[in-house]
């Protein structure tokens, strides 16, 4: 992976790209398999970081235990040798139990998150093509793809329309198309940019759901709390119900 790609991916994952840079990056992501692979690899590395740290701890315990042993074991081990063995074996066993428990909890948590998303997610309905924000036939074509369920094609068409000044209608349906295509990172990035009151509440709700699917539970919970705090938000009831099911 080139240094340039590393910088782009780092800024994308930390949500530091401005709208124009984000649009450029998403276009590259759609057209550059190597960049997509590099992004997926970075996401896998981040997920594996916790288990790698645990492995290092076990290695440290092993080396510490080995260094504490005499050059040779006598036929009758002394109480001190037994103490050293028991101490480090117990520590290693505890870490292995923690690792197994963490793996199980992660799998169960992932399952709960997926179930939450599946229970509350419904693809946003499309607009009638005769009522698009402009008379641009390109928007109508994008909406036809979207409403037919071809979300990858719709995302590509909406992205081509997302040139300044871009309407929030286009941004929202670009984010919705990414959601339908399972590109939750891209959906979150785009939906964060939606500011118009006509789509802001919807964008917040779907950004919360995408964050759940990405296991960004703290982010999702904060968005949902903000939705519940606004009595005029049409998603207040769903957000409140979802929070009651929040994983403990």
Image (tube, helix red, strand yellow):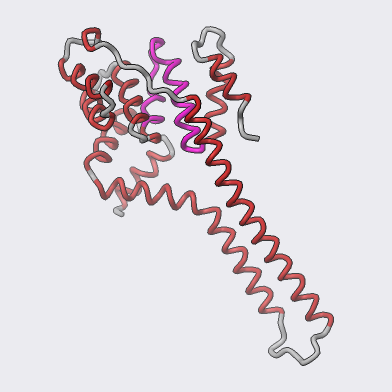
Q: Eyeballing the image, is 159 above or below 129?
A: below
For image coordinates 24% across by 35% down, the residue present is: 27
Q: Is residue 44 left or right of residue 77?
A: left
Dominant secondary structure, magenta: helix
Q: Nearer the viewer, residue 64 or 86?
A: 86
Where is residue 75 drawn, in percent x and y?
77, 92
- On whether residue 197 falls in the magenta region, the answer is yes
Vertical order, 77 against 227 (above or below): below
Q: Return the residue nearer the eye: 53 or 138.
A: 138
Q: Residue at x 57, y 33 (%)?
A: 218
Left or right: 90 as drawn, with respect to 40: right
Q: In the rendered image, which quarter contains the N terminus?
A: bottom left
Give residue 153's position: percent from left, percent from top: 23, 30
Residue lying at 40% horizontally and 49% vertically, measured from the top left: 42
| Quadrant of the frame with the C terminus | top right
What's the magenta region?
187-216
**Residue 71 in picture, x, y percent from top left:** 69, 89
């Amino acid at each position: 992976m080139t240094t340039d790609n590393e910088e782009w991916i780092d800024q994308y994952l930390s949500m530091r790209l401005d709208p124009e840079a984000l649009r450029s990056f998403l276009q590259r992501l759609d057209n550059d398999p190597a960049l997509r692979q590099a992004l997926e690899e970075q996401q896998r590395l981040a997920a594996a970081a916790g288990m790698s740290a645990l492995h290092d701890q076990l290695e440290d315990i092993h080396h510490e235990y080995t260094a504490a042993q005499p050059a040779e074991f006598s036929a009758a081990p002394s109480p001190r040798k037994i103490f050293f063995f028991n101490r480090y074996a117990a520590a290693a066993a505890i870490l292995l139990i923690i690792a197994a428990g963490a793996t199980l909890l992660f799998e169960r948590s992932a399952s709960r998150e997926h179930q939450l998303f599946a229970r509350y997610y419904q693809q946003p309905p499309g607009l009638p093509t005769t009522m698009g924000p402009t008379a641009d036939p390109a928007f109508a074509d994008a909406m036809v793809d979207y409403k037919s369920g071809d979300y990858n094609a719709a995302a590509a068409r909406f992205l081509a329309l997302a040139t300044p000044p871009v309407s929030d209608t286009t941004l929202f349906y670009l984010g919705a198309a990414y959601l339908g295509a399972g590109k939750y990172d891209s959906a979150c990035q785009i939906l964060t940019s939606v500011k118009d009151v006509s789509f802001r509440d919807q964008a917040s709700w779907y950004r919360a759901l995408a964050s759940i699917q990405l296991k960004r539970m703290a982010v999702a919970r904060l968005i949902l709390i903000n939705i519940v705090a606004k009595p005029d938000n049409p998603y207040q009831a769903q957000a409140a119900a979802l929070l009651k099911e929040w994983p403990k």
